[in-house]
Amino acid sequence: MRLLRKLKDYLIILLIILLSVKNSNAFENKILFKIDNEIITSIDIYEEIKFLKIFNPNANNLTEPELFEISKNSILRDKIKKIEIKKLVKDIKVEDKFLLDLIRRKYFKTEINSLEIFESYLKNNNLNINTIREKFTIELIWNDLIYQKFYKKIVIDREKIKNEILQNSQKDYQKEFLLSEIVFNVESKDDLKIKYEKILMDLEKIGFKKTALIHSSSETASNGGLIGWIKEDNLNQIIKKVISQLEIGEFSKPIRTSSGFIIIKVEDEKKSALKFNLEEKVNEIIRFKTNEQLNQFSSIYFNKLKKDLIIYEL
């Protein structure tokens, strides 16, 4: 029955894509999913796929069923976060300057430097401006919610960090790694085996970036899993040890974290001159480790919310 339902969903979205209409009202808008009082319609999926293709070129070579799954999961994440946010805030809105900052960080390779340019870009590509604004607003409020809820639980040993820096201070250079990730969560060892085998198949068939788009639950998924350049000293000991055994272009086996599993790929590496300022270096590592722990808390909290909600396929 579930297989027939999925086939039906794929046929709906395939029809939507094949229509390639500028006006999404040109076809029947159907409710596909319902979570609490939030719904996901065929138009929602259509808009999400357009957004994905415009801002992530890797999406253009994916199949229609793959695009459907990615877009559905992306919208589900937003809806689940929205449901929780609405319990805590009256209006889902943030100041434009925070929206612009997030947009710049997400699309730093583009020439978007104002909300007017961004919204004009959306309009020219027939994307719903209000939908995209809400998507980013939810992300910002969610991040603030996680910080307010968990910042007192963050554990940082400043003295330990300082001692580790001093131990490495004799070096005249530091290593940096350009890293990508695939983050996922499973319920059991059997599920882990099945999930990992599927990821390996897709890695071999379509490469890391597209596989991250399909399988990763991290915010980096929309960017093909790319984390960016990370200094070696900022990495935790487990990740650092794994990376030290990888060549450029290689990826790790699943590494267990407090919030699930992560597969790390070394895209590139370099050595840079070590500019040693103890306090600046300590604060830099503390910021990195704080964000790392907040991301883990976010993933754990989200997975708990998802388990407590029932997602209806209509």
Image (cartoon, rainbow, N blue to C red):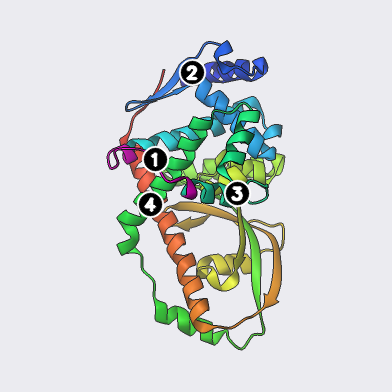
The mark nearer the N terminus, 3 or 2, is 2
Q: Residue at x 48, y 41 (%)?
A: 136
Place residue 172 in its image quadrant. Answer: bottom right
- Quadrant the C terminus occupies: top left
- Residue 176 visible from this viewpoint: yes
The mark nearer the N terminus, 4 or 3, is 4
Q: Which mark is residue 225?
A: 3
Q: Amino acid at mark 1?
A: Lys
Q: Which mark is residue 144?
A: 4
Q: Which mark is residue 193?
A: none
- Name the one closer to the observer, 303 or 105: 105
Place residue 57 in its image quadrant. Answer: top right
The label nearer to you, 4 versus 2, is: 4
Q: Amino acid at mark 4?
A: Asp
310 above or below 118? above
Q: Residue at x 45, y 61 (%)?
A: 291
Q: Residues within 10 Å of mark 2 (few under 14, many from 20)?
A: few
Is mark 4 in CB contact (under 8 Å) with mark 3?
A: no
- Residue 245 visible from this viewpoint: no
Which stretch is magenta?
A: 84-97
Residue labelled with disc 2: 5
- The reply, left or right, for residue 312 in relation to residue 193 is left
Q: Is residue 85 magenta?
A: yes
259 above or below 1? below
Place residue 139 in its image quadrant. Answer: top left
- The reply, left or right, for residue 151 in relation to residue 111 is left
Q: Amino acid at mark 2?
A: Arg
Is mark 3 in CB contact (under 8 Å) with mark 2?
A: no
Q: SS of the residue at dot 2?
A: helix
| Residue 238 screen position, x and y as percent | 51, 67
Q: Amino acid at mark 3?
A: Gly
Q: Which mark is residue 93?
A: 1
